[in-house]
Amino acid sequence: MIALQLTTNTATTTDLQHSLSMLKALTGGERLRIIEALMKAETCVCDLDHLGIEPALLSYHLRKLRESGLVRTRRDAQWIYYSIDPDAWRAFATPLATFFGTIDLPPEAAYGAGQRCEPISGDAPGCGPDCAPGSGCCS
């Protein structure tokens, strides 16, 4: 099992603040779905109709992503193509990856591994040395 760990690496406060402002641009499922599509290929808005987002709302989200700097545009005749700006994406993701390192969780932290009390012979199942009889802690 892998988890995030706060680290003391070299992510500066300014870098983290920039990344946090970019995270705001990624709020909402629609924007994340747009980003996911753009990570696969540069695309024009008409090719994003498979996302099922109304055209006006799609344009709104694309504008917000452009304003954040994560998405860039390129005009080819009457078509406008959208793509992820790799430099902006790197500037966004690197401080977060530096700040939140990944660690392997110990088996004790896995889902279902916790147990409040160890059984003691003669006591009800699940009661331990800190449980007073009749306290209800293990019932």
Image (cartoon, helix red, strand yellow):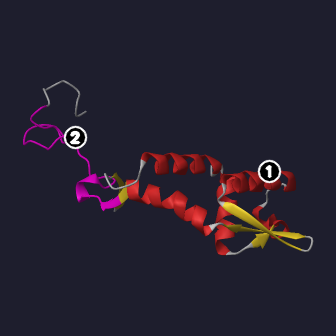
Q: Name the residue located 25 percent from the left edge and 33 percent from the top edge.
A: 139
Residue 3 in the image: state x and y as whole percent: 36, 57
Q: Which residue position is annotated with label 1?
A: 60
Residue 61 in the image: state x and y as whole percent: 75, 52
Q: Is residue 107 magenta?
A: yes
Residue 135, located in which quarter of the rendered image? top left
**Nearer the N terminus, badge 2 or badge 1?**
1
Q: Name the residue located 48 percent from the left edge and 51 percent from the top edge.
A: 15
Q: Describe residue 59's horizontal placement relative to residue 7 as left or right.
A: right
Q: Which mark is residue 7?
A: none
Magenta stretch in the rendered image: 102-130
Q: Which residue position is annotated with label 2?
A: 116
Residue 124, located in which quarter of the rendered image? top left
Q: CA distance from mark 2 to mark 1?
A: 50 Å
Q: Main secondary structure of the magenta part?
A: loop
Three-letter code for the amino acid on which mark 2 is drawn:
Arg
Q: Is residue 117 above or below residue 65?
A: above
